[in-house]
Each structure stands twice: as C-alpha cells, then as structure tokens.
Image (cartoon, rainbow, N blue to C red):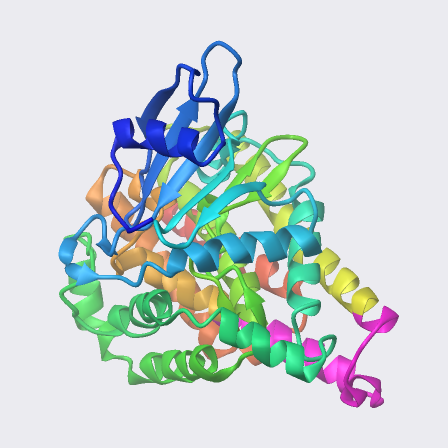
Amino acid sequence: MAYSSLDESAIVDYVKNVGLYEQDESLTVKEIGDGNINMVFYVKNEKTGKSMIVKQAYPYVRCVGESWPLNQDRIRIEAEAIEKEGELAPGLVPKIYHQDDDMHIMVMEDLSHLGVMRGQMLTMTKFPKFADHISTFLANTLYFTSDIYMNPTDKKELVKSFINPDLCKITEDLIFSDPYYDHERNNINPALKPYLVDVFWKKPELRLEASKFKYKFLTSAESLLHGDLHIGSMFGDSEETKVFDSEFAFVGPMAFDIGLLIGNLLINYVSWSGKTDKFSEEQITDYRDHLETMINDIYNLFEKKFIANWNKKSEDILAEVEGYQQHFMKELFSDTVGFAALVMIRRMHGLAHNADVDDIENEELRKDVQVRMLELAEEMLMNREKYSKIEDITGFIKKNVELNKEAVVA
C-alpha cells in the first residue's frame, strides 16, 4: 500500500481492511495527539468496548509543518523498540497489534484506563509501585542490550536496526546545544531572559561540560535506549506502569535514559516552590518526601537489579575482570548525574518545557523557580564526580530548596 496521510474517516477503513475490526462494526474515531510530531487516533467500538490506538508518522514535524521534514522510519523504530522492551520488561509497555512500514503506522493497546504520570503528579498523585516497575524496565532494557551481555555480532545488528538520525538530531540540538546560547528555538520566560544574558550564557564552562556529554551521546553505543524517558512518556496508577512513546529509541549511552528520568523528577521536586499559593506547606513537604524516596528507590533498585543481571550472565570477558564492575557502576552514576542536570537546564528555557514549572502563572515567580533550577543543575553538572550515591543528589536538592525557602521567609 502506497503511503498516504489518514484522517479520522480513513482510519475506520484502514483498521477494518487490515483485520483489526470486522467490516460491519460501527466505530468511533477521535484524533487525540497532543505531541509535536505524530498523528494519534483513538478507535473504539462503543457497543463491544473494543478499543485501540493508531499512530501514524507524517513526513514532517506535525507542529511545524513541511518546513521541518522528518524521516518516517521513526514509526518502525518505535514499534520495534516497544516490542524489544516488552520482551525484556514484560507488562511495562503497551502491546503492539499491527505494524505497517509502508503507511508508517502502528496500532497498539489502548491504555486510557491509566493517566499520563506527569499530569497526575501535578496534583500530587503518588505511585507506590513505580520505583520497582521502572527500575526493572531500566535494568533489563539497558543490561540485556549491552555489550556486557550480548554477542558482539548481534549487538552490531541491533545498533544498525535502531539508527535514528532525525530524532537524535532533535535531542542533540535541544538538550546539548541550544540552551547554552541565545538560539531562536529557545522558549524563554521574558522574566528569565536577563538572568540568561547576564549570568548563564556567560559561563563557557557550562557549554564545555554540555559538549562533553553531547559527544558521549553521539558516540557511546552502549544499550538500546528509550531516548525520551520521562514522566510524560509513562502511564500509571497505584498498580500499573506503562512506558510508551519510544520513537526516540536508538543505541546510546545507558546513563542518558536514567538521567533523563531522574532529572524530570527533580524538576517536579523543585517546582513546588512556586506553588505555595495552591498547596499548603504540609502538602508540599509530604509530596517532596514521597519524591525523594521515589528517586532514591529508582536508582538503588536499578543498580541492584542491573548488577544481579550482570552477575547472572555476561558475554564479554571484561565483565569478569576484578574491579571492572565497580568502575563501570561508578562511571554510570556520574554520567547519570550529568545527564540529569542537562535535562533540568534544557526544560527551563529550551524549546520544550515541562508543565511542572510552566503551570506557575506568575512570570516572576516562575523565573525564581527557573533560576533556582539552573543553579542546582549547574552544581550537579560541574561537580558530578563528588557525588557517589543517589542520596547525595536528593540530599543536596532538599537542603538547598529548604535554604532557599528560609531566605525567602527572611
């Protein structure tokens, strides 16, 4: 079938013609995509309740148009990444029902009984099983697609299958380059601009460290990454966690996925400083305690499970060299801290922000939170090697947020 972009009426014919529904079924279709890149349709038989999600990749960035072309092979990459993630971390990703490489479509499980975690966390929802779930996802996907575990030939085939230049280029620019100078793509709170001009952009040492991590991102083909692992790419409730939106998947530095997630959770932690008009001090303290425990548990459980995988079976002889595992885990943690800091910076004034901070309506109050976030991230990035465990990071953030609150009160 030759490619054509589908609208809601064409989606009805498509899902029937490929055998996902019977021809005589009455279906409702709604376009629900709220992202920047793809079209996403919700399909349902109201009588039987059978529903699914259809995602189609257009040949350009949806929110910009044809002036920003984008390789449609990204939908194949996403579908195959989800299949691989499901194989390695069963139950933690949606099921794939259909993949069409000609039409650049995939059809997957409807998870609308769950909510996207970011939106829920804006109202202080807690996820008691999330740390266990996501640490399993990280430990299994990162270890079992690494050179420590895989046969070298199979690993190189994996790298080839997930070459994803267009989506990687977006990450390369938006995380590692644009935030460090006055780029036209940056989305800047007007109240923050003087701080960026007078302080942040006058620190070449930050640009240097970002460049070091950009090179890691470009060259370190360690494991198959989700590539955009944050709380906006996860559905969850008190019992379930589902990771979705793997279109940025590629084989890269494993600390990137871990750092991306932890950085986004730290953004949520700090952001409550700008919401004292909506939530009480007791509520904020309680939720921050929950976040602190969650972040600590995520990394500690990940480390425990990753090492258990390593000790159970490894492929390369280097994995058996005395002291190498300890060296590897130390480097992994340091890189995780660096990547976490970079995403905290990027989300303050780069192209794409987090609602955690952007829903602070007052520009001056939002600026205060953004400046604090940039200062904390700078310390993490510049001095990452002095931190040896995740509690050092959460303790540092907690202490400095409390000090900032005392300064405001004073």
Residue 209 placement (x, y as % from top left): 40, 82
Which sits in the foreground, 74 or 3?
3
Residue 88 placement (x, y as % from top left): 69, 56
Q: Is residue 111 above or below residue 35?
A: above
Q: Residue at x 28, y 46 (%)?
A: 366
From where the camera sits, is residue 286 visible? yes
Image side of residue 239 versus residue 47, left or right: right
Image: magenta residue range: 310-338
Q: Is residue 329 magenta?
A: yes
Q: Is residue 324 magenta?
A: yes
Residue 205 placement (x, y as % from top left): 35, 84
Which sits in the foreground, 20 or 233?
20
For the image, the number of numbered tags is 0
Residue 345 placement (x, y as % from top left): 36, 63
Image side of residue 373 versus residue 286, left or right: left
Identify the main secondary structure in magenta.
Answer: helix
Q: Is residue 241 above or below residue 212?
A: above
Q: Residue at x 47, y 48 (%)?
A: 99
